[in-house]
């Protein structure tokens, strides 16, 4: 993979045609990897008079974030969160009743309001 200077002379790009990965290097920052970039997009980046604009508009949205890949979230984790949320709501509702009456209201109290 060879690095090519773009027309801005400060930005460099390298393209791997087999994997369709594009690496872009801006001054003062590490290279940024972009996955599944078509060859014509790489060629247009090399030929454009404004590589910064072209990069931001056409390429930047496909950035591959460095770090570990995201793991799929299981349905069980959503179920656990839902159960905890329902338990918390239930607890709030039961403790919100008037403690002087043991959680119940007299029929006369309900009619007076």
Image (cartoon, rainbow, N blue to C red):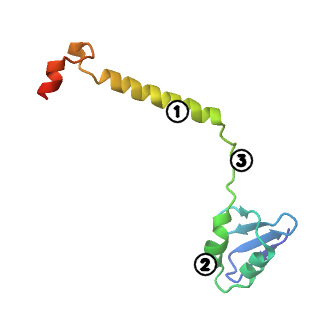
**Residue 21 in view (yes/no):** yes
Instruction: Indicate which disc, 3 or 2, sits on the residue closer to the N terminus.
Output: 2
Q: Which residue in the rendered view is the most extreme toward the right?
A: 18
Q: Is residue 20 left or right of residue 54?
A: right
Which residue appears at 68% of the width and 64% of the height? 62
Tag 2: Cα neighbours inside 10 Å, few (<14), some, or many (≥20)? few
Q: Position of residue 75 (x, y in %)?
A: 64, 36
Do we see residue 28 in this rendering?
no
- On screen, residue 57 above or below 33: below
Dot 3 falls on a residue whose secondary structure is loop
Query: Disc 2 on helix, strand or loop?
Result: helix
Comparing labels 1 and 3, the label whose residue is closer to the camera: 1
Q: Secondary structure at mark 1?
A: helix
Residue 107, given in percent of the width and then of the height, sits at 18, 19
Residue at x-position 86% and y-position 68%: 1
Q: Residue at x 71, y 46 (%)?
A: 68
Q: Does residue 96 lie above or below 101 as drawn? A: below
Q: What residue is shown with label 2? A: 53
- Quadrant containing the C terminus is top left
Q: Nearer the viewer, residue 29 or 45?
A: 45
Left or right, 17 with reference to 75: right
Quadrant of residue 41 within the rendered picture: bottom right
**Numbered label attached to residue 69:** 3
Q: Which residue is found at the position 75% from the left and 66% from the top?
A: 23
Query: Mark 3 touching mark 2, by CB under 8 A?
Result: no
CA separation in Å, label 1 and label 2: 44 Å
Q: Residues within 10 Å of mark 1 (few under 14, many from 20)?
A: few
Q: Position of residue 10 (x, y in %)?
A: 68, 76
Can you identify the residue that label 1 sits on?
A: 82
Query: Which is nearer the N-term, disc 1 or disc 3?
Result: 3
């Amino acid at each position: 993979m060879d690095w090519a200077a773009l027309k801005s002379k400060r930005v460099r790009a390298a393209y791997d045609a087999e994997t369709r990965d594009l690496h872009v290097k801006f001054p003062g920052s590490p290279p940024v990897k972009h996955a599944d970039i078509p060859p014509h997009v790489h060629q247009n980046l090399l030929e454009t008079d404004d590589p910064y604009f072209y990069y931001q508009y056409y390429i930047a949205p496909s950035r591959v974030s460095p770090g570990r890949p995201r793991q799929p979230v299981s349905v069980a984790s959503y179920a656990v969160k839902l159960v905890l949320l329902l338990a918390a709501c239930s607890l709030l509702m039961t403790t919100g009743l008037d403690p002087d009456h043991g959680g119940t209201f007299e029929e006369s109290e309900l009619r007076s309001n």
